[in-house]
Image: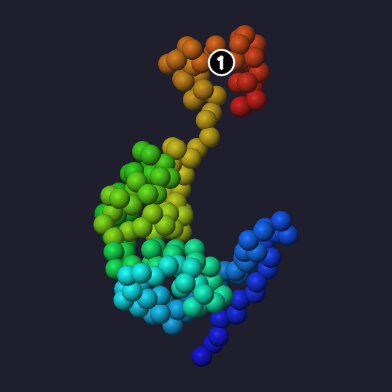
Amino acid sequence: MQMRQSTQTNISKSDQTNKIKKQRCRFTPREDRILKKIVNDQSDFSWEEIAQMLPGRTSRQFWDRYNNYLSKQISNAKWTDEEDELILKMYTEIGPKWTLIAKSLKGRSANNVKNRWHKTLSKRYGKTEKEKPLTVVDIDYIIAKDNTFLSKFGEENEYTLFRELLS
């Protein structure tokens, strides 16, 4: 059985609470089993207590692990085409608002959705309109649509300078 190694380093000398930053490494199956058992069997646990019982990780790491991967409410099923299409559609409309997108997908956490986007969908579909930088044509369209835009930049020569900087 391979043991997980974890090194500890001080965050900073000015940190009066002496918090320790833990090195990132995969959770072991043993840690997952213990974490699920504690959360499912005990109603009065705290994440800090779990971190003390299983040294080498912070309470936040245990909270993240449980809520994003181990909870009964989280689906670990294969992603469907329908889920991918919904993520793509919503991302195009509202951008990277993972919590809002996750609410539309049963059993998927915001972190699951974010990871699905970055590891698979963004590579498959490339940048969406939300991610592309504005061009001079885009700026001209915005200005034509809303003439009050010029008042934010003062005289027209400042607008021209601004426009040149973007091109």
Q: Nearer the viewer, residue 142 or 94?
A: 94
Q: Position of residue 126 (x, y in %)?
A: 46, 48
Q: Nearer the viewer, residue 44 or 96?
A: 44
Numbered-mark total? 1
- In this rendering, the answer to whether 155 lies above or below 32 is above
* Residue at the image position 50 percent from the left and 37 percent from the top: 132
* Residue at the image position 54 percent from the left and 13 percent from the top: 150
Q: Nearer the viewer, residue 2 or 162?
A: 2
Q: Image quadrant of residue 18?
A: bottom right
Q: Position of residue 84 (x, y in %)?
A: 33, 54
Q: Position of residue 93 (x, y in %)?
A: 36, 38
Q: Image quadrant of residue 157?
A: top right
Q: Amino acid at mark 1?
A: Lys
- In this rendering, the answer to whether 155 lies above or below 81 is above
Which element carries disc 1, helix, strand or loop? helix
Q: Nearer the viewer, residue 151 or 138?
A: 151
Q: Position of residue 85 (x, y in %)?
A: 31, 50
**Residue farthest toward the bottom in the current orientation of the protein:** 1
* Residue at the image position 59 percent from the left and 15 percent from the top: 153
For label 1, the residue is 152
Q: Image quadrant of residue 129?
A: top left
Q: For the C terminus, give its image quadrant.
A: top right
**Residue farthest toward the right in the current orientation of the protein:** 13
* Residue at the image position 51 percent from the left and 22 percent from the top: 139
Left/right of residue 134 with respect to residue 104 in the rendered view: right
**Residue farthest toward the top in the current orientation of the protein:** 155
Is residue 85 at least partly visible in the picture?
Answer: no
